[in-house]
Amino acid sequence: MTLYFDLNTFVDSADDDLLRRVDRRVATYYLAVPLAGEDDRVTVATACPDNAGALRVLERLLEAAVVPVAGSEDELLATIARLYPETAPGQAAIMAWTDDPAWANAVIATANAFGRALERPVIILDATTTPDEVIARAGYDFSLIVARAADGAGLERMVRRSPVSLLLVRGDFAPVEHSLVALRGYGSDFATLERVYPLLAREGAGATVLPLSPGQPESGRPNGGPFNGNPSARRHLRQFLHETGCRHFAVDIRLSQGDPVGQIAGELARGEYDLLVMAAEAEGDFVWRVLSRIEGEQAWPGRPVLIVKPPVNYEPGIKD
């Protein structure tokens, strides 16, 4: 059973060493803050105590077992603002890379288009650069890697080890007019939606939001109702709809049941989408299953996938 604590009673005694291990970017991505450690265990306040992937990453960073205690999203955001110093927003560049020269034009065209939309400079790497070298260069200086790997092993390496978000090029560049945005009800939903706003700002661009629901229909409601599933996803969805409605962006919602991977694959097969946006929680197990499914079924070929990644550097040799 996960306990709930009033964060106000812990903020003043938070451990500075633990805060350095989990920096502000990671804390914000996961909505999780380490508070105190004792006997190789660290108490972590989190808005998503059931997010096993996030807890696994936090254990790796803290080098200790994590004891999650629940806090509300608003409390966690306020706590992060109090505990961590403000950082000035930087102009992190976009990295363009492929190890297959035949794909260079498509990758560069895609990177330049997203650079314009996100107002970021683009740095183009040579095709002789290996996936590990790309990963090693990624960090605070980059906000996005636009990539195409020549083989499946290189692609999986990028998905699982990149410390910044990835835009996977799967065909020639075409304007993104309509995106499918998957929400999982975790803290990463905020980072996912932030990635979508600049694309929506383009005239005529729109998005469909897919709140993933692993559960069965609610008792007494055969169709599950319009907001069946994760309550955090419902909250994120309502906030997103409110903000986009105020800016008159074209946004709609798709609701479904069943396996989350199948929900995404099925919606891509049914709709006309130019981009899939989804978040990774740790080493990318979920997004890799989605990629394997859509590649295997060839139901949505040639269109790019934007994977929002946790800002975590993975040490060489660490196994999932």
Image (cartoon, rainbow, N blue to C red):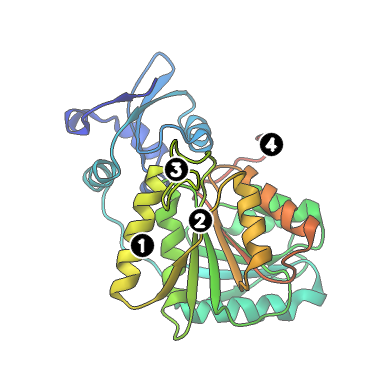
Q: What is the quadrant of the C terminus in the image?
A: top right
The three-letter code of the residue at mark 3 reads: Arg
Residues at badges 2 and 4 in contact (C-beta under 8 Å)?
Answer: no
For disc 1, the marked residue is 240
Task: Residue 142 in the image: state x and y as whole percent.
Answer: 51, 64
Please tell me whether mark 3 or mark 1 is closer to you in this view: 3
The three-letter code of the residue at mark 1 reads: Phe
Task: Residue 51 in the image: state x and y as whole percent.
Answer: 48, 36
Q: Identify the secondary structure beneath mark 1.
A: helix
Separation of marks 2 and 4 at Cα, in angstroms: 40 Å
Residue at 63% x, 77% y: name it: 110
- Residue 222 vs 141, above or below: the answer is above
For disc 4, the marked residue is 317
Task: Residue 169 in the image: state x and y as whole percent.
Answer: 69, 69
Residues at badges 3 and 2 in contact (C-beta under 8 Å)?
Answer: no
Separation of marks 3 and 1 at Cα, in angstroms: 26 Å
